[in-house]
Image (spheres, rainbow, N blue to C red):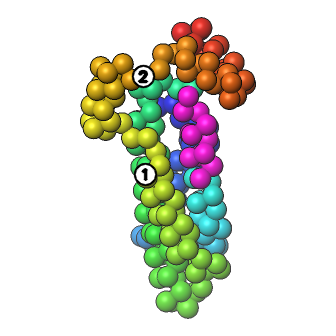
Amino acid sequence: MADTVLYRIQSGVVQLIEEAVSSWKEGGRDGELLHELQGLVGLCLTMPDRLKEVWDLSCRRTGFWPASEHQENGEHLRALFDRAVIAIESLRDLARRFEQQGRPIRRSEELEQAVERLKDLRQRFVDNWLWITPEIMQESREEYARGDYQTVQEILDELQSKNPQLYSAARRRLESS
């Protein structure tokens, strides 16, 4: 996968949340856990914004990784959204358990909003990512057979007229391959 440092960081954060919640469900360290939970809640509240940054960066990099990796990158990012939703829901449930015991977790009531924002963001991602489906492949083959396509040179010429910097980067990449 043509992942980014930002993707790997957020994937690591989600993994840490998953592992922490899993171990905390076993109990045993409630006093210490209360303070850790409060810190983790704050981190989880920023997760929708962080994953939006990963998505934005992925969109900007789409033209710079091989087309063969595009589908895989989308699947990885969708899976990260899914894992983040589950992890924050698990944390929310654990915080509720503490609250039922009379030990409120600061800002935990905001976790539901973070989950909803993540679900909405995930759906927008799924709806807007250019997924390479069998239907799209068939449509592309038919367009190609009809001669309804642009050559690499035509695409580069169009890029140059719209965005000279992007054109230069694309030209260098093409020449180096």
Measure how far apart labels 2 and 1 are at the Cα level.
Answer: 26 Å
Image vertical order of residue 30 relative to residue 144, above or below:
below
Please report the bounds of the magenta region as a residue range: 52-63
State yes or no: residue 165 in magenta: no
State yes or no: residue 62 in magenta: yes
The quarter of the displayed image where residue 72 is located: top left
Q: Secondary structure at mark 1?
A: helix
Q: Nearer the viewer, residue 122 or 13?
A: 122
Q: Secondary structure at mark 2?
A: loop
Residue 120 appears in the picture as rendered: yes
N-term mark: 2 or 1: 1
Image vertical order of residue 140 relative to residue 77, above or below:
above
Q: Position of residue 9 (x, y in %)?
A: 60, 45
Q: What's the residue type where badge 2 is placed?
A: Tyr
Task: Determine which residue is flagged by label 1.
Answer: 126
Residue drawn at point x = 65 percent, y = 79 percent:
106
Task: Determine which residue is flagged by label 2.
Answer: 149
The quarter of the displayed image where residue 37 is located: bottom right
Q: How many dots with numbers? A: 2
Image depth: mark 2 or mark 1 in front: 2
Image vertical order of residue 3 relative to residue 18, above or below:
above
Q: Position of residue 177 (x, y in %)?
A: 54, 9
